[in-house]
Amino acid sequence: MQELLWILGSFTLRDALDVTLVALLIFAIMLVLRGSLALSLARAGFLVVGLLLVASIFGFQALNWLITNAVVVLGLAVPVIFQPELRRALERMGRGGWFVRTAPNNDRDLVIQEVVRAAERLAERRHGALIVLARASALDEYISTGVRLNSVVRAELLLTIFWPKTELHDGAVIVDQSAHLASAACVLPLSASRNLPNPKMGTRHRAALGISEVSDAICVVVSEETGRISIAHDSKMTTRLDAERLRGILQVLYGLKPAARQPLTLDGLRGWVEARLAQWMPVHQQRGKA
């Protein structure tokens, strides 16, 4: 206790700045890990550090021995148990985007218009669809699992691909970083999350969440059973979208200003707000069922 009082008595402005920087670093780590099981791991780590400080300050030798030995064991087990979550967290920390060649805004605007047009008609026909829009993260390993097309994105092409009787309808279409339709019938990883927004979620929606867990891609999903349109991004899913709200969300997440080439509407504004919420809200707070 005397040591703690001595530390508080000698606290200076420099120490305050030091503590502030550490707090900001911890906050940044929490933001990187949010929405994943690794967040629980980080919280447990901070708890262990806190217990070590308490044991050191008050001289609890038994508690200090227990935590010190437990940390050694957990240090070997954690990288194995939480490998998917740690991989995703490290990728997000290293994702800068400065050296990634991305498509011009005009090309992205065209992709948005064609995807929205196709999604609206697919929803009317209740044809299931899975459309992935790549951003900073390269999706080459998933593009290689499908049939290479290297085509300009057109709504008619998407409608043809996802027609139930075609060979390419069962899988995902991936639009690469150059805004070209790179491949169809691609295989995506299924979500590893233990807190799905809907336990009865189908394979398409699990795949959409899965690709959003391992990359920063945006995934548009059309349900074959209900005809509802959803968007998965950053391990979160926003459901029950119409064409205007889909367009507004894509314009935000895909790097364009809302309603840049068309008059601002109430639905478009609502889509912009939902896109912002989708970047921060946990999965279980997204409204509606897929």
Image (cartoon, rainbow, N blue to C red):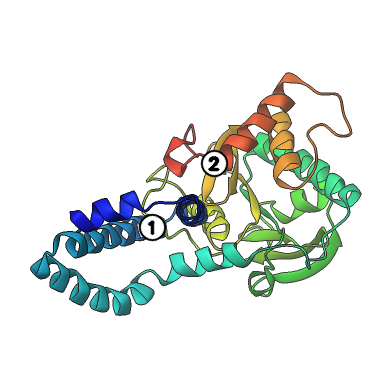
User: Alpha-carbon neighbours of circle 1 within 10 Å: few (<14), some, or many (≥20)?
Assistant: some
125 with respect to 111 (left or right): left
Task: Give the residue type that dot 2 points to.
Answer: Trp
- Vertical placement of residue 264 versus 44, above or below: above
* Residue occupying the point 20% across, 60% down: 57
- Vertical placement of residue 169 versus 100, above or below: above
Q: Position of residue 7 (x, y in %)?
A: 31, 55
Q: Position of residue 287 (x, y in %)?
A: 49, 32
User: Alpha-carbon neighbours of circle 2 within 10 Å: few (<14), some, or many (≥20)?
Assistant: few
19 with respect to 234 (left or right): left
For disc 1, the marked residue is: 37
Q: Give the quarter of the image for residue 74.
A: bottom left
* Label number found at residue 47: none
* Residue occupying the point 25% across, 51% down: 5
* Label number found at residue 280: 2
Q: Nearer the viewer, residue 185 or 23?
A: 23
Q: Nearer the viewer, residue 176 or 243?
A: 176
* Residue occupying the point 13% across, 64% down: 59
- Cα separation, mark 1 vs mark 2, equals 16 Å
The reply to whether residue 228 is in sight is no
Q: Position of residue 101 (x, y in %)?
A: 82, 65
Of callouts 1 and 2, the N-terminal one:
1
Q: Position of residue 161 (x, y in %)?
A: 73, 56
Task: Give the residue type that dot 1 points to.
Answer: Leu
Q: Give the structural element (helix, strand or loop) at label 2.
A: loop
Give the quadrant of the N terminus: bottom left
Q: Give the structural element (helix, strand or loop) at label 1.
A: helix
Q: Residue furthest top?
A: 266
